[in-house]
C-alpha cells in the first residue's frame, strides 16, 4: 500500500487540540507526523484545499440486520453507507435474527465485519433472546469481542435483572447501553404523547416512560459503579436527570441522534412513516433541551441509530409500520445544520462529538489523527449544498426523512487504515 498524503486541508483533530491548515500523512495504515520529500513523490495524494480533514467519524449505534434480516441491510452494505457518511468505526446492535446472545452468533458477525469497508464492532445482548428474563453469557461474549452489552430495541424491565446485569458487566469491564423505555407506559404507542398525538388521533408514548428508566439506570449505576450509557435520549427531563447525575459523579454517558436534534413531533402531521421512530420525535422544548445538553456536555456524543427497513414494511398504515430510519449518510450534514447552523457551536466541537467523544464512551481506539493512530480519516466540505436521494445511497433501505432534501455539508473522501475507500466523485473503488 502506498503512503498517503492529504494536502492543504483544514485539519481538525480535537483530541490533539489541532485546528490548522496543513497536511495529514499515513504509512502502513498509521498516521505519521511527516513524510520525507522522496516518499511524498510516491505517495497517493488527496487534495483537501477548502475541505475539512478530521478523524474518521465514530457511530456507536447502528443496526446492520445481519444475521437474519439482510433484505434490509447487511454488514457489507451498512459499512458502505457508513463510509459514504464519513464514518470509519461503527458499533452494531445485537437485535438481529437470531439475536447476538452467544459467542457463536457473535463470531458470525465478526466474520462478516472482517470483510467490511469500515471497522464494524459488535455488541451482544444483555439477556438471552433479548427476552429480559435470563442473563446472556457475558464473559464468553466479551471474550468473543463484544465491546458492550445491550438489548437495544427493547429495555430490560426487571430492575432486579438489570441490577445483576450491570454488576456482571462491571466485573467484565463492559459498558451497558440502555434503550430507556418503561413498557407498561408505552403499550401500542406510536408517537410522543401530547397535544399533537391527540390531534392526530395516535396513541402517545409519554416521556415519563423514558425518564423512569433513565432514573432507574442512574440509581443502578450509582449503586453498582457500573458504566451505563443511555441511548437516543429524547426527553427534556431525562437530559436534566443526566445532568444532575453527572454532577454527582455517577458513571453514566448519553447520546442524542441527529433526527432528535433536528426534528419534532410536528413532522408527523402527514403520517409519513419515515418520521416514526422509537423513542419518538418529541416537542420543540425537548429538542431545545437536547441541544442545551450537547452544549454543556451532558450529552456525550451523537449516535445515528441507523435502522434500515424495507419499503414494503415502512409503506404501511402508521400504526403498523416499524420504528426507525436510516441515518449514516445524512448524519454529518444534519448534525452540522443543527449544531453549527442553528445552535452556533464551533465546527471543532461537532467534530469532537462525532469522533473522539463517541470513541471515548466505549473506550475505542479511534477518533484522533495523532501520530501512531490508525489512519482513519474523514474529508468533508462543510458548506457544499447537495440533495440527498436515498435511492442513490449505499444502504439497502431508503427509509429516510431526508430523502429528496437539500442539506449542507458533504463527505468528499473516507480513509480507513490509510486506504481511500470512498470518494464523492468515484464512490467505492
Ligand atoms: Zn433503541
Ligand atoms: Zn437502536
Image (spheres, rainbow, N blue to C red):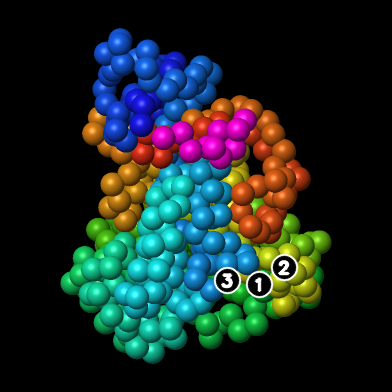
Examine the rendered structure and indicate whether residue 280 appears above or below residue 212: above
Specify start and end residues of the magenta stretch as a single range.
419-429
Seen at 36% across and 31% down, the residue is 1
| Quadrant position of residue 399 | bottom right
Judge by depth and name the residue closer to the eye, 209 or 383.
383
Secondary structure beneath label 3: loop
Can residue 335 be seen here?
no
Q: Secondary structure at mark 1?
A: loop
> Mark 3, residues whose alpha carbon is within 10 Å: few (<14), some, or many (≥20)?
some
- Give residue 69's mark: 3
Q: Which mark is residue 322?
A: 1
Q: Which mark is drawn over residue 314?
A: 2
Q: CA distance from mark 1 to mark 3?
A: 13 Å
Q: Position of residue 357 (x, y in %)?
A: 36, 46
Is residue 421 within the magenta segment? yes
In the image, residue 159 sits, relative to residue 290, either above or below, namely below
As rendered, which of 349 and 330 lies closer to the eye? 330
**Residue that extends furthest to the top in the rendered view of this protein:** 37
Q: Quadrant of residue 382?
A: top right
Label 1 or label 3, whichever lies nearer to me, is 3
Amino acid at each position: 500500500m502506498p503512503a498517503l498524503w492529504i494536502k492543504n486541508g483544514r485539519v481538525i483533530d480535537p483530541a490533539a487540540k489541532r485546528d490548522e491548515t496543513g497536511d495529514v500523512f499515513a504509512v502502513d495504515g498509521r498516521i505519521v507526523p511527516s513524510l520525507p520529500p522522496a516518499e511524498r513523490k510516491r505517495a497517493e495524494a488527496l487534495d483537501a484545499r477548502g475541505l475539512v480533514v478530521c478523524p474518521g467519524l465514530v457511530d456507536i449505534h447502528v443496526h446492520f440486520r445481519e444475521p437474519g434480516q439482510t433484505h434490509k441491510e447487511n454488514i457489507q452494505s451498512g459499512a458502505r453507507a457508513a463510509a459514504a457518511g464519513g464514518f470509519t468505526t461503527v458499533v452494531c446492535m445485537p437485535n438481529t435474527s437470531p439475536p447476538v446472545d452467544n459467542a457463536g452468533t457473535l463470531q458470525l458477525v465478526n466474520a462478516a465485519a472482517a470483510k467490511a469497508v469500515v471497522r464494524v464492532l459488535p455488541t451482544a445482548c444483555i439477556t438471552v433472546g433479548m427476552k429480559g428474563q435470563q442473563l446472556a453469557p457475558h464473559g464468553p461474549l466479551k471474550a468473543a469481542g463484544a465491546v458492550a452489552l445491550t438489548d437495544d430495541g427493547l429495555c430490560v424491565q426487571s430492575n432486579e435483572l438489570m441490577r445483576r446485569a450491570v454488576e456482571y458487566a462491571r466485573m467484565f469491564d463492559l459498558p451497558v447501553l440502555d434503550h430507556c423505555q418503561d413498557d407498561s407506559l408505552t403499550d401500542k404507542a406510536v408517537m410522543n404523547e401530547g397535544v399533537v398525538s391527540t390531534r392526530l388521533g395516535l396513541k402517545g408514548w409519554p416521556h415519563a416512560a423514558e425518564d423512569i428508566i433513565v432514573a432507574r439506570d442512574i440509581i443502578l449505576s450509582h449503586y453498582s459503579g457500573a458504566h451505563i450509557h443511555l441511548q437516543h435520549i429524547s426527553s427534556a427531563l431525562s437530559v436534566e436527570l443526566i445532568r444532575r447525575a453527572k454532577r454527582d459523579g455517577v458513571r453514566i454517558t448519553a447520546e442524542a441522534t441527529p433526527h432528535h436534534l433536528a426534528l419534532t413531533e410536528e413532522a408527523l402531521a402527514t403520517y409519513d412513516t419515515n418520521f416514526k421512530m422509537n423513542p419518538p420525535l418529541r416537542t420543540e422544548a425537548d429538542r431545545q433541551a437536547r441541544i442545551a445538553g450537547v452544549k454543556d456536555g451532558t450529552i456525550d456524543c451523537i449516535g445515528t441509530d441507523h435502522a434500515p427497513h424495507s419499503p414494503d414494511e415502512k409503506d404501511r398504515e402508521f400504526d403498523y409500520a416499524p420504528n426507525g430510519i436510516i441515518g449514516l449518510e445524512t448524519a454529518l450534514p444534519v448534525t452540522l445544520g443543527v449544531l453549527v447552523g442553528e445552535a452556533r457551536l464551533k465546527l471543532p466541537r461537532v467534530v469532537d462529538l462525532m469522533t473522539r467523544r463517541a470513541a471515548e464512551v466505549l473506550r475505542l481506539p479511534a477518533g484522533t489523527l495523532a501520530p501512531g493512530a490508525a489512519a482513519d480519516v474523514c474529508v468533508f466540505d462543510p458548506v457544499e449544498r447537495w440533495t440527498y436521494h436515498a435511492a442513490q445511497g449505499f444502504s439497502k433501505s431508503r427509509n429516510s426523512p431526508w430523502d429528496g432534501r437539500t442539506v449542507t455539508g458533504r463527505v468528499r473522501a473516507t480513509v480507513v487504515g490509510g486506504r481511500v475507500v470512498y470518494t464523492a466523485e468515484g464512490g467505492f473503488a
